[in-house]
Amino acid sequence: MILILILGYTSITHGQEALCTSAKKNLTIIEPYDIEVTFDKTTHLLFPSGIRYVDLGSTNLVASKAEDADNVLRVKASVRDFEEETNFSVITEDGTFYSFNVSYNSCPRVTNYSLTKTVKTDREWNSKPILFKELGRNSPYLVDELMGEIYNQDKHFIKQICTRKFGIEFLLKGIYINDNKFYFHTQIKNLSFVSFPIDFINFKVIDKKKAKRTVVQEVIKHPIRVYSAIDVVQGKTVSRNVFVLDQFTIADDKVIRIELHEKNGSRLQILEIKNSHLLKSKLIQQENVRKDKERYFERDVK
């Protein structure tokens, strides 16, 4: 009886080990990068996308994003000659996760690192990229790819929504939809030689024009993703952009107003969109983006 129990216990133990080993095999290992830091010099890391999150493994490190450069991280040692290796992690706006092992070197050979050439490998490790709350189940990388597809195709299928004032032409080229997200494709053309600095762009739902004494109700719609940050449209140039907003509809007695505000100026541009335009949004297919994925990777790693 004792022998049987021992054999049974051994079988169970081996079975548990096999299960544990099997579970471990299912985990994808994200290989860390090895870098060195020092107290008297700053190490810079250049990422292919804006930095969203940074976690430091110990107080031996300090880090911050570079001013006016969301994709550059500054790292240095906060104490001299720390002995134990530490680490830090970074999540970028395209949903990619990066891991770094850090050791101290009083005179590091390299202080500047570019991760833009490693984008293919990192995205292969992140086969299921990190999801951001505002994007729901949409992958940040896929949303960026859809915006890029709209921008590169540059189609203009909405013809009536346009304004031209003060030497500036502002128009809506198209509205697309994918997975409960609207993609608004806009264009700004500066017809003058006077530059047009952009302060901000508003999306709001308002009542259609009523009597002057009627109070107009406004609901602000905040873009959750923007293809490109445009600060100024120089004279005689054209700039385009893509804005992502959560899906919504409006009543027939309301319109969507897009307001383009000039910084330190008064050349306000306004577009108004009806609910009928939203309902005619074109579906942008994910399959088309996936077909171009390898070409995108190859372009980035060259």
Image: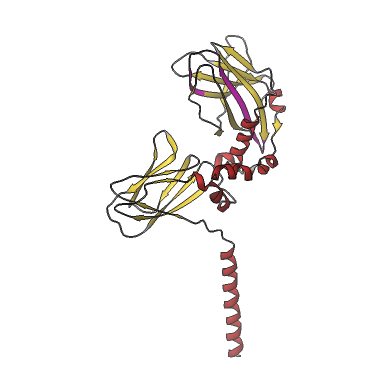
Give the x, y percent position of residue 116: 50, 44
Quadrant location of residue 223?
Answer: top right
Asked if 167 appears above or below 86 in the picture, the reply is: above
Against 101, residue 218 (above or below) is above
Q: Residue furthest top?
A: 212
Residue lying at the far front in this picture: please name it: 302
For image coordinates 41% across by 42% down, the residue present is: 73
Residue at (57, 69) in percent of width and height: 21
Which corner quadrant of the image does residue 202 belong to?
Answer: top right
Q: Position of residue 265 (x, y in %)?
A: 46, 14
Please say if 14 is above or below 46.
below
How is colour applied across the structure in the image? secondary structure
**Residue at point 54%, 45% (across, down):** 301
Q: Nearer the viewer, residue 49 or 298?
A: 298
Q: Quadrant of the C terminus?
A: top right
The quadrant in which residue 253 appears is: top right
Q: Nearer the viewer, residue 115 or 285?
A: 115
Magenta residue span? 178-200
Q: Is residue 194 magenta?
A: yes
Q: Give the number of callouts.
A: 0
Relative image position of residue 138 (x, y in whole percent): 61, 42
Residue 119 lies in the magenta stretch: no
Residue 152 pos. (x, y %): 62, 32
Q: Which SS does the magenta portion mostly show? A: strand
Residue 134 in view (yes/no)? yes
| Observer able to see residue 132 | no
Looking at the image, is 19 positioned above or below residue 128? below
